[in-house]
Image (tube, rainbow, N blue to C red):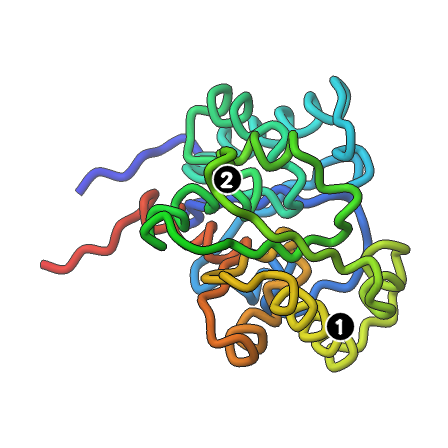
Amino acid sequence: MKIATGYPFYGQQVGVLVFSTVTPRVPGDAGNAASFRYPVRYEVVQGGFADLIEGGQEIKENLLAAGRRLTSLGIRAIVGDCGMMSLYQDCLGAELGVLFAGSSLCQIPLLWQLMGRQGEIGIITGHSQLLGERHLRASGWTDEIPLVIQGMEEEAHFSEIVIHGGLDLDVDRMRGDVLSAGEKLRQKAKGLRAVIFECSNLATYSADLHQQLGLPVFDTLSAANLLAYGAAPPRYL
């Protein structure tokens, strides 16, 4: 068996682009390495989610630079830690030359196929006024796919910690906020078939939402796991 050489470390196939923030990241969150069943390599991107509301050349270059640092180290698949990194899905995927999921939202077209092109996909986003049509279309969404969007901006603890940068995260309060948003989504979407968490801070609570709604739930980690499988498929024989 031949092993590729020329790298300073080995055994990591998946890289995660994270912003230079200090918000607490608990297991289940893509910003916490304990969330993954395989080793990951983090690369810090200068900036924050606010830079991706409208986007711009500076944040685009920062994302590309961070992605290039990962690929130069032998990383073969990269996932974005913020759902709004989807704004640069195409250009980063093309430029980096490795599997790239800028957002959990890139699973929208796949889910639509898996659902038999019937029903509605729910999106729970960090802020419904900040997630724009550009982010959705860059993720592969088309007009034929019915989406119902529910924001977390009205949930008090989420707003305190994620939107306003608070440091005293209470997991049980955050879980309550997520389930509150899930119930609001259920009331809005009568044909709901599946849910995607746009915000990577929410994947910790995917099992809770699945239990509440009785529906499939997808998030940043489900996207990362798909990439990890493609980058290093298991050998069975």
- Label whose residue precedes the other's in the sequence (1 or 2): 2
Identify the residue shown where x is 62% and y is 25%.
64
Identify the residue shown where x is 42% and y is 45%.
13
Label 1 crowd (10 A; few <14 / some 14-19 / many >=20): many
Helix, strand or loop status at disc 1: helix
Of the residues shown, which amino acid type is indicated by label 1?
Answer: Asp
Q: Is residue 68 above or below residue 204?
A: above
Q: Is residue 89 above or below residue 192?
A: above
Kindly identify which numbered label has been placed on residue 101: 2
Q: Is residue 177 above or below residue 117?
A: below
Does residue 35 appear to the left or right of 227 in the view shown? right
Kindly identify which numbered label has been placed on residue 84: none
Label 2 crowd (10 A; few <14 / some 14-19 / many >=20): many
Q: Nearer the viewer, residue 174 or 117?
A: 117
Does residue 12 appear to the left or right of 32 in the view shown? left
Task: From the top left corner, tell me how far across and down residue 138 is, in percent.
Answer: 56, 30
Instruction: Name the quadrant containing residue 237.
Output: bottom left
Of the residues shown, which amino acid type is indicated by label 2?
Answer: Ala
Helix, strand or loop status at disc 2: strand
Task: From the top left corner, tell me how far across and down residue 143 is, in percent.
Answer: 51, 34
Identify the residue shown where x is 49% and y is 54%.
120
Task: From the top left corner, tell me how far across and down residue 171 is, in percent.
Answer: 74, 77
The residue labelled by disc 1 is: 177
